[in-house]
Image: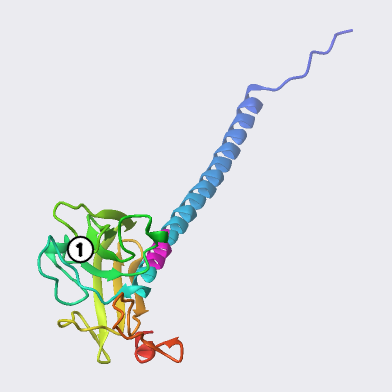
Amino acid sequence: MKQRGLGGFTLIEVLLATAIFAVISIASFSILDGVLRTKEGAEQKQNRLNEIQRAWLIIERDLLQIARRSVRVEGEAPQTGFFYVDNGDLMLSEQAIAFVRGGWSNPNLILPRSDMQPIAYRIQENTLERMHFNFVDPVIGEEPIIRPLIKDVTDFKVQFFVDKKWRESLTENQWPEAIALIIDTEDLGELTRKFLIIAEPFNNDSNATTGTENGQAVIDGPQRAAQ
């Protein structure tokens, strides 16, 4: 009586199983790679949106506390007006705006400075930057403190709402009722925000008017046009 041989797989069966396993592995890797790429893209977009939203919040905070205060540069006579656009003395580019804000936190005057802060927003190497000095009137040699806000910016424009019209510039000592900031980005296109400016801004001058009626700030007027 002959003994039966042990069962096994032929070479063709082994090659076929290997091919099937390879196809399944490639398909699984493709699906996993697609999921990872989608996750990475979603995280990049979310980070980008967070970056822009954070920048708008910072800009809004500055504009809400804007002051009717001019600036002296290196001991020279005060600048005319309260908003500065394309002013080389303030280290600004053609795509920039500068002003003075109040309410800069300094509890009990611990730091040797006031609670007013000169602010500038400018485009530098395709990045929207916030720039400020420690003192309202910068002295000779004082370097600004710069904070990058939004990257990949191609253009930055400012418009002022005055006399029921949007204008590109202001006359001397003219005060706008609203400000529009227009930012062009490489990936998201044009971004526009409009901010109401209080009628009587923060001012340390005790003779300045309060800008309130019955305990409420006077901001009526351009509200509908500015929205």
Residue furthest to the top in view is 1
Image-based side of 151 in relation to 137, left or right: right
Give the residues in magenta. Answer: 51-58
Name the residue nearer the viewer: 92 or 4.
92
Does residue 201 sit above or below 107 in this rendering?
A: below
Instruction: Give the residue at x 33% y 76%.
Output: 202
Occupied quadrant, residue 82: bottom left
* Quarter that holds the C terminus: bottom left
Instruction: Give the residue at x 19% y 53%.
Output: 142
Q: Answer whether residue 54 is magenta in the image.
A: yes
Image-based side of 139 in relation to 20, left or right: left
By secondary structure, the bulk of the magenta-drawn segment is best described as: helix
Q: Position of residue 104 (x, y in %)?
A: 36, 64
Type of the residue with mark 1: Asp
Does residue 70 sit above or below 220 in this rendering?
A: above
* Quarter that holds the N terminus: top right
Name the residue nearer the viewer: 32 or 157.
157
Q: Which residue is mark 1?
A: 137
Name the residue nearer the viewer: 48 or 170.
170
Does residue 19 sit above or below 123 in this rendering?
A: above
